Image (cartoon, grey):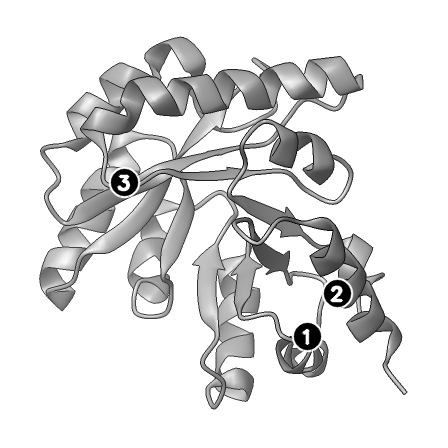
């Protein structure tokens, strides 16, 4: 008999197109729950707190998980996560790019990142304002160890139309910025709004508590 977690994962997968990747935001999940989700067919997991992330890695090192970092990243934490992550979703300032470049040179690796966009204009959200994103992408070109794979945004906590506007503007920005970057990933949509995000062109959704439930 399938577990509740497996049932939730299968239900979500049945609702999303084949070209949209499912990432589980696993901050509320124990290594045991992450392992169960992996066995249910999910390979992408995102952590947003460095300390929690580093504590989970040893317990899951036998699994070919693709780890992403989806939270606000402090420059002094870059060194700790770089060996473990495939994609950083929250590049939002030059000082962070400088540190990523520095640590990537030491490790002799290239680092995949998304530019975080503040599509709602809310002061309590991270990210680059929409009207500054092109200039930011141009400036990032001098950091040759960073491969910008696309954009990430968190929509406003508002009406469906307000949410849709956030996603639509970010998708339009990607078209404008595409010649300056390496990829076309649009990381948009969480548990409460992912169908709207997919409708506006999201290629990667980040679901957490709606799949994992309360912290385990």
Q: Which of the image's four quarters has the C terminus?
A: bottom right
Of pointers 3 and 2, the one earlier in the residue sequence: 2
* Point 63% across, 59% down: residue: 24
From the image, tell me which residue sits under label 2. 9
Q: Is residue 28 left or right of residue 69?
A: right
Q: In this view, does 29 lie to the left or right of 185?
A: right
Tell me the quarter of the picture where residue 165 sits: top right
The residue lying furthest to the top in this view is 131
The residue lying furthest to the bottom in this view is 62
Mark 3: few/some/many CA within 10 Å (<14, 14-19, 20+)? many
Q: Which of marks 1 and 2 is in front?
A: 2
Taking 204 as reference, is 110 above or below it? below
Q: Residue 37 carries which label?
A: 1
Q: Work out how far the residue at label 3 is from the one at label 2, CA to CA, in angstroms.
A: 29 Å
From the image, tell me which residue sits under label 3. 148
Of pointers 1 and 2, the one earlier in the residue sequence: 2
> Are dots 3 and 2 in contact, CB under 8 Å?
no
Where residue 29 appears, as percent x and y from the top left, is 71, 69
Where residue 77 appears, as percent x and y from the top left, is 37, 56
Q: Work out how far the residue at label 1 is from the one at label 3, CA to CA, in angstroms.
A: 28 Å
Determine the secondary structure under disc 3: strand
Q: Residue 141 carries which label?
A: none
Determine the secondary structure under disc 1: helix
**Which of 45/53 is in front?**
45
Mark 2: few/some/many CA within 10 Å (<14, 14-19, 20+)? many
> Are dots 1 and 3 in contact, CB under 8 Å?
no
Q: Work out how far the residue at label 1 is from the one at label 2, CA to CA, in angstroms.
A: 8 Å
**Which of 29/179 is in front?**
179
Q: Which of the image's four quarters has the N terminus?
A: bottom right
* Point 54% across, 76% down: residue: 55
């Amino acid at each position: 008999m399938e577990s509740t977690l497996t049932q939730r994962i299968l239900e979500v997968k049945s609702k999303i197109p084949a070209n949209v990747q499912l990432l589980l935001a696993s901050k509320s999940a124990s290594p045991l729950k992450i392992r169960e989700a992996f066995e249910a067919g999910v390979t992408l997991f995102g952590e947003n707190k460095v300390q929690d992330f580093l504590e989970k890695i040893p317990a899951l090192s036998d699994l070919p998980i693709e780890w992403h970092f989806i939270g606000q990243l402090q420059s002094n934490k870059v060194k700790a996560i770089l060996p473990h992550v495939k994609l950083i979703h929250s590049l939002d300032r030059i000082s962070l790019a400088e540190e990523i470049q520095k640590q990537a040179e030491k490790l002799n690796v290239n680092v995949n990142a998304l530019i975080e966009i503040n599509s709602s204009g809310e002061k309590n959200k991270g990210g680059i304002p929409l009207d500054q994103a092109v200039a930011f992408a141009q400036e990032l070109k001098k950091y040759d160890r960073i491969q910008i794979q696309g954009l990430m945004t968190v929509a406003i906590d508002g009406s469906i139309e307000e949410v849709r506007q956030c996603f639509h503007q970010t998708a339009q920005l990607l078209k404008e910025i595409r010649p300056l970057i390496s990829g076309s990933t649009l990381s948009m949509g969480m548990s409460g709004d992912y169908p709207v995000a997919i409708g506006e062109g999201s290629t990667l959704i980040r679901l957490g508590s709606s799949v994992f439930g309360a912290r385990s």
